[in-house]
Amino acid sequence: LNRYKKKVKLIVFSSVVPKVYNQIKSYFKSNFGITSVEIKNLKLKNLIDVRVNKKQVGSDRLANSIATIDSKNNYIIIDFGTATTFDVLIKKKYLGGIISPGINLSLNTLTSRASLIPEINLKKISYVIGKNTNEAVRSGFYWGYAGLIDNMIKLIKRQTKSDFKIILTGGLADLYKKSINAKCTVDKDLTIKGIIKITRNLI
């Protein structure tokens, strides 16, 4: 970084762990003299109209929304991260969202707490009724979360009386693309695209 520090004017962070972010922010400032800023502390009104308390929305979710949003379409962004989140965009308005337990986090919690359930890698299973513990757990998580996603999309449509384009992002996006009823697209780079868009807006 030393060879680039004269060119780097600002570091933009998307962080949901304030303690770690503050440590990194302090490191860059004290060692390189570079200022860091967290997305939620920026003025984003010209990029997105947030209709909820911005402080209560994760920076990754704001970045995803800013990467996606346009003035013509409505979107539901589903992010398969530590939590499974749903963010609702009506044109350029961010209406809020839903936070459900993360799939891998829930699976790891189950296997660590139940000694008779072995660790498994989550993958597609074509049938619902498992013939052994591994199959039963795999079915529960694969089809269970597919059902959760389908139902959340249905409820969002019912509440808003609107249709949406569905975008999946995060580690398990590809796994669920073909298992849910709604037509959807996958974009694994959504968060970084949002950060780039925000950064360009600052220049």
Image (spheres, rainbow, N blue to C red):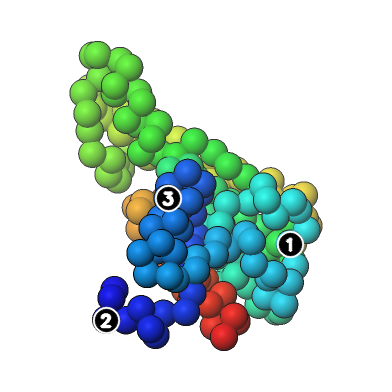
Q: Which numbered disc covers residue 23?
A: 3
Q: Quadrant of residue 202?
A: bottom right
| Closer to viewer: mark 1 or mark 2 | 2
Q: Residues within 10 Å of mark 3 (few under 14, many from 20)?
A: few
Tell me how far mark 2 sits from mark 3, CA to CA: 22 Å
Tell me the amino acid under the disc marked 2.
Arg
Q: Circle 2 sits on which residue?
A: 3
Tell me how far mark 1 sits from mark 3, CA to CA: 28 Å
Q: Nearer the viewer, residue 197 or 20?
A: 20
Looking at the image, residue 6 sits to the left or right of residue 3; the answer is: right
Pinpoint residue 192: horizontal percent, then vertical percent.
44, 69
**Residue 59 showing in the rendered view:** yes
Q: Which numbered disc covers residue 50?
A: 1
Residue drawn 24% across the image and 14% down it? 115
Q: Nearer the viewer, residue 18 or 45?
A: 18
> Residue placed farthest to the top in the image?
115
For the N terminus, the image quarter is bottom left
Looking at the image, residue 130 sits to the left or right of residue 185; the answer is: left
